[in-house]
Amino acid sequence: MIRRHEQRKPRRQPNRIVRRKRPAKADVPLQKPAHAEVGRKDHAVGRRRRRLGTQTVAYGRRGLSWLRARRLSIAAALLLLSVVGAGVWAWHSPALRVREVEVEGAVATRERDILERVDLWGERMLTANLGSVADAIAELPLVASVEITREWPGTVHITVREREPWGSWEQAGLRYTIDREGYVLGHRDPPAGSTTIVSNESYSLRPGDRVDYHAVDAAAEINQQIEEALGTRAVELTYSPGEGIRVRTADGQTALLGDSSGIAYKLAVWARVAEEALARDITYSTIDLRFGDRPVLR
């Protein structure tokens, strides 16, 4: 018996879609047509231009940041340059040189004599030696003090304080007016009721000379204190280089006081001696007080 086996028809496989991964760009470069390469070049040029603009902006921002961080230093440098420039201009500018000299306070002293001692015209205002000019003016006999100031831009102002009359000094038959320090001011009129000192010296004096200042000091203190100490006043004051100052009072007493040291103490001793002499009925014409607590009666 013959059996026939029927062959089965093979089944048709269904259609399948197989997805494969694309190769990485590094592994398989993409092929592009020639026209694409031309476009790529154009694109790279444009990108380079954009990079240049971006870098310029970045540099500008960095510059602004640098300026902001150092603005104080830059401002200080600019200020320093301005000051240096102004100093250089002031040093060389003719506008800041001495062009005028003003004198104030000169009455008995001639202004011409003061200006003759001023050598500042054309000097720089910043470096003009005012001290040496003040010393030269102070040597004038009637000048007590000098003050010199700068008045910008080109004026020097001189203020003079002259010696003030205090009393009289008679010597060699002439009367001279003197100030409180004993400087001779000439033959000007002294103040009314001022002190007169008579010297037995025989030479003449000139304005600016100085008499014995110890005698002047002693005479000034005697006039201030004698009335309180003795109840009288001085009517005559004389000076001798050997014995100093001698005073004669209104009640006829005469005292030899020497120099100006310890005038208050000498007057107190004189007052005590006068009381004891009155109590003991002792008469004297002159008392020598040059030795302090050891008075000598004559």
Image (cartoon, grey):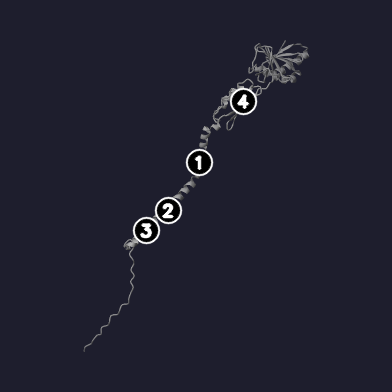
Please tell me which of labels 2 and 3 falls first in the chain. Answer: 3
Between the C-alphas of marks 4 and 2, the distance is: 74 Å
Q: Toward the viewer: 24 or 39?
A: 39
Q: Nearer the viewer, mark 4 or mark 2?
A: 2
Q: Residue at x 50, y 41 (%)?
A: 78
Q: Earlier in the sequence, mark 4 or mark 1?
A: 1
Q: Does the CB distance between marks 1 and 2 fall below 8 Å?
A: no
Quadrant in which the C terminus is drawn = top right
Q: Amino acid at mark 4?
A: Val
Query: Residue 215, position in %: x, y?
Result: 67, 16
Q: Residue furthest bottom?
A: 1
Identify the image quadrant of residue 138: top right
Query: Which residue was labeled with disc 4?
Result: 146
N-term-proximal mark, 3 vs 4: 3
Residue tagged 2 = 53
Q: Which mark is residue 42?
A: 3
Is label 4 in contact with label 2 (beta carbons under 8 Å)? no
Q: Secondary structure at mark 2?
A: helix
Tell me the tag on residue 78: 1
Q: Counting residues from the N terminus, which is met first, the one under dot 1 or under dot 3? A: 3
Instruction: Determine crowd level at label 4: few under 14, some 14-19, many 20+ residues with C-alpha closer than 10 A.
Output: some
Mark whose residue sits in front, 1 or 3:
3
Q: Secondary structure at mark 3?
A: helix
